[in-house]
Image (spheres, grey):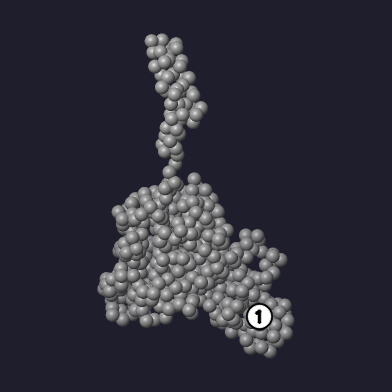
Amino acid sequence: MQASCYKIEKQLVYYTRFKNPVFHLNMIKPFFMTRYILTLVISLFFVTGFSQKTTKPKLVVAIVVDQMRWDFLYRYYDRYKEDGGFKRLLNRGFSCDNTLIPYTPTVTACGHASIFTGSVPAINGITGNDWFDYDRNDFLYCTQDDSAQTVGSSSDNGRMSPKNLRVTTIGDELKLATNFRSKTIGIALKDRGAILPAGHSADAAYWYDSKTGDWITSSFYRTTLPAWLKTFNKINWVDQYYAKEWNTLYPLNTYLQSTPDTRGFPRRISQHIGSNKGIIVATPYGNSFSFEMAKAAINGEQLGLDSITDILTLSLSSPDYIGHAFGPNSVEVEDCFLRLDIELGAFFNYLDERIGENDYLLFLTSDHGAANEPAFLNEYKIPGGNFDKVKINDALKKLLAGKFKEPDLLIEILNYQIYLDRNLMEAKKIDKASVYKTVIEFLEKEKTVDRAFVLEDIETTTLNDGLKKVITNGYYPKRSGDIQIILRPQIIDGFLTGGTTHGVWNPYDAHIPLLWYGWNVKPGKTNKEVYMTDIAATIAALLKIQMPNGNVGHAIVEVVK
């Protein structure tokens, strides 16, 4: 800056000497006497006028659509509204069109944990929705916490917390970065969809109690519900939704992206008024209910109204319930996403008005996709089938009992893995290698199984490197099984007809949408391969905070540049 000042001095001297002799040099002596003051002024001008301000968004909104395949963005694109949510994200936001899940099993708990930790099950410890825990010598649900109590109802559905999650979330890191002045709230119909994204230090996570029809939380977070939620719960939301019935948004014969409906619309859900509070989760009104809850939380907690960034995580659970029940080629799923498009658009309008159009950062992704129904594929001569876990479990249990004289060697087939009783084998001095060999030979005779191998020996298998890495990323020894099962493509666990499931490495389960929108996001797209685990690192880069402590992902350059 001092050099700039001397340059100005030189120009002034040249002007007075050669261009305008009347303008004597003595007349500008005060300038030379105050050049250091001028240097300071110029410095301040450059700092305040040209340097980029380190402003941050007021609110980060994270939306996870449970069981949304990437192709749903384009499968129904022509039917999405111009002022809806999906076209707004695709045309005015940034889309990562080749986003993959880098581990197995591709299920809800693993997906929500990995999105917000930037980690994988091998590190964050969430190896399934539930698993056999060798430390406990018992089965464990992903968010189970026997020390916690339900807050908001008399049921046991609130005895949950994130204590089984081994690492921090992006919300935890934002809390640390702001000296715990920021707020983090997690919302979902499913407990795991609310708790795992919110993290350990969240102000609260709220989920739906299907026994009472109320939103609840856990004593892990707080001892009573906030006043705004008590007021929200007093509104008879569920019966109001039931009274609307479930009819298709458009004439039934226009649903050309779906197989013909054989079950009949409208769905007479009004019969459940005053009784079954659980049915709502398997209707599009579950999304409506979740959006209303999200708005109530933003208003009640005053999220995004000051200069300190807050985080709201919103998981939309109903597409998963609907997908499981009817399959991805159903009218029900198409109708769900056409309605979701409209509701997303309305929610974005609410955020524009409440927070400010350029003051919130939003991303939308999914925790997993879903397979096509085997019966539907077979109709068009595409291979597909059913892995009958119950039948195989019983046959394998009988085989092991007969050969090794122990009826309880097999604990369970879970998360596409064989869990064996390690303590029993050690206590009875049963040769572990012999048990493994027996199990693998049995499984490889099953026509739906591509291969099976011992998980601790994965490095010596003949798997290609990509698949080997995916399975390694899902392997946490004390919470994973002993033998990995790899099914043939389009073989699913259950749901031969009338529905579907997910959980494997194949693209129909592992290729998910990822769209960014709002604060500092420039429109565009990339087909570069990125991963679910890159999301947390990207948020950290945008907010200029530390990545979660188990993070293995990388900031997506096209988003943060």
Q: Tell me where residue 151 appears, x and y as whole percent.
A: 38, 76
- Residue in view at x 47 percent, y 72 percent: 161
Residue identified by numbered label 1: 422
In the image shown, does 529 or 47 lie closer to the viewer? 47
Q: Tell me where residue 352 appears, x and y as whole percent.
A: 32, 53
Q: Is residue 24 above or below residue 332?
A: above
- Residue in view at x 56 percent, y 66 percent: 124
Query: Is residue 485 in view from this perspective?
Result: no
> Horizontally, is 173 left or right of 78 in the view?
right
Q: Is residue 558 above or below residue 323?
A: above
Could you tell me how many numbered marks the image carries?
1
In the image shown, does 249 or 532 lie closer to the viewer? 532
- Tell me where residue 389 sits by quadrant: bottom right
- Residue kind at label 1, given as amino acid type: Arg
Q: Secondary structure at mark 1?
A: helix
Q: Tell me where residue 284 appears, x and y as whole percent.
A: 35, 68
Query: Is residue 425 in view from this perspective?
Result: yes
Q: Tell me where residue 430 appears, x and y as whole percent.
A: 72, 84
- Residue in view at x 32 percent, y 64 percent: 300
